[in-house]
Amino acid sequence: MLINRSGTMVVPFMTLYLTQSMGVSIAKAGLVMSLFGAGSICGGLIGGRITDKIGFYYLQMFALLGGGILFILLGQMTSYPAICICTFFLALVNESFRPANSAAIAHYSKEENRTRSYSLNRLAINLGWAAGGALGGFIASKNYTLLFWIDGLTNISAACLLWLVLAPSKNAATLKRPADKTVGALSAYRDKPYLAFVVLSILFFYCFFQLFTTLPVYYREQLSMSEQDIGIVMAMNGILIALIEMVIVHQLEGKRSNLQYVVVGVIMVAASFMVFNIIPGGFWLAVLAMLIVTFGEMLSMPFMNSFWISRSTESNRGQYAGLYTICWSTAQVLGPATGGQIVQHFGFDTLWWFMGGLCIVASLGFRQLHLRIQSAQDHLA
């Protein structure tokens, strides 16, 4: 994952590439990114189903190799329709990796260290994303086409490492075929508590994505922060996660139910939005808000992973992982677009109250879900 994410350069700079290098309008560039989001949703859904049929190892190999080839191919496209089509299929293939990877982490870990396993994976993603973003900015200033080659080749390199270390012929822990269907195993699409969790997760992720879209604009326009200061505040998130998330999760894992930690984490994210409307300030207000949201993220997201894993089995884990992947993709499509519209028509104050309020609604929903699941378990006992 670290190798794969270290090459993440195309998506962060795709809009700049289209407008600056290809001469495409901002509106058309936005459509391309929407197609990427649509492809991601399809990839999550299809990838989850295929994972349960052929196994997580083979789908990860296909997604890494196929995604690598398509990244390189996209960099060679010169016509707008071809870019649109290639972007959609790239997202579909590339994002089918996520549910397979989630199922793999669950398989290789144990119940007592599962949340830490997902935190370790998040650590790799954050470190890789930071390295890829920093290097990508330098490369983009020289040659945009190189971004596609590097992104593609790191995908392919990750596939090679996956084969060298975790191929069924080389590692006894890797399943050669999917597990037989567990008797009585519930389909993710019929698991009502889990479907409620999916809806609540979409609400939460929708708000969370404002951190990477409208929030930097707010820093610049309303708090009068320089680009350098904005970069420092945004980097705090990844640095804190890399330094202390594993420690926090290790201390908390198994002591309370997963959803109890999620409730607290989502409330903290709500507070990080609302603080902008309550406390006046500039740089240090941004630092305070980032500290709050980062701790909220560390309390919520690792335990959200553990929750959905706890409801799945080896034979239906792909379905659960696929739906969870769709939560991210749906929020990634809706969040940036609607957040910008709210700011344009009603202002930043309204945006922060709205996002904070929506997070509170999601937190109350998670709490109610926890109470219902706990009540059902007590009844069975």
Image: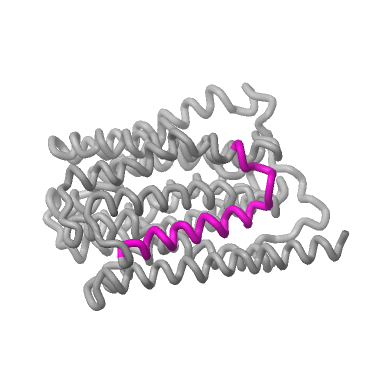
State whether residue 236 appears in this view.
Answer: yes
Answer above or below: position of 199 versus 21.
Answer: below
Residue furthest to the bottom: 345
In the image, what residue occupies the spot 45% across and 49% down? 95
In the image, what residue occupies the spot 57% across and 68% down? 364
The reply to whether the magenta stretch includes residue 366 is no
Q: Main secondary structure of the magenta part?
A: helix
Coloring scheme of the render?
A: one colour
State whether residue 104 appears in this view.
Answer: no
Q: Quadrant of the C terminus?
A: bottom right
- Residue 192 in the image: state x and y as whole percent: 68, 68
- Residue 38 in the image: state x and y as whole percent: 40, 62
- Residue 275 in the image: state x and y as whole percent: 35, 62
Q: Is residue 351 left or right of residue 308?
A: left
Residue furthest to the right: 381
Give the extent of the magenta segment: 250-276
Answer above or below: position of 7 versus 16.
Answer: above
In the image, what residue occupies the spot 38% across and 40% down? 238
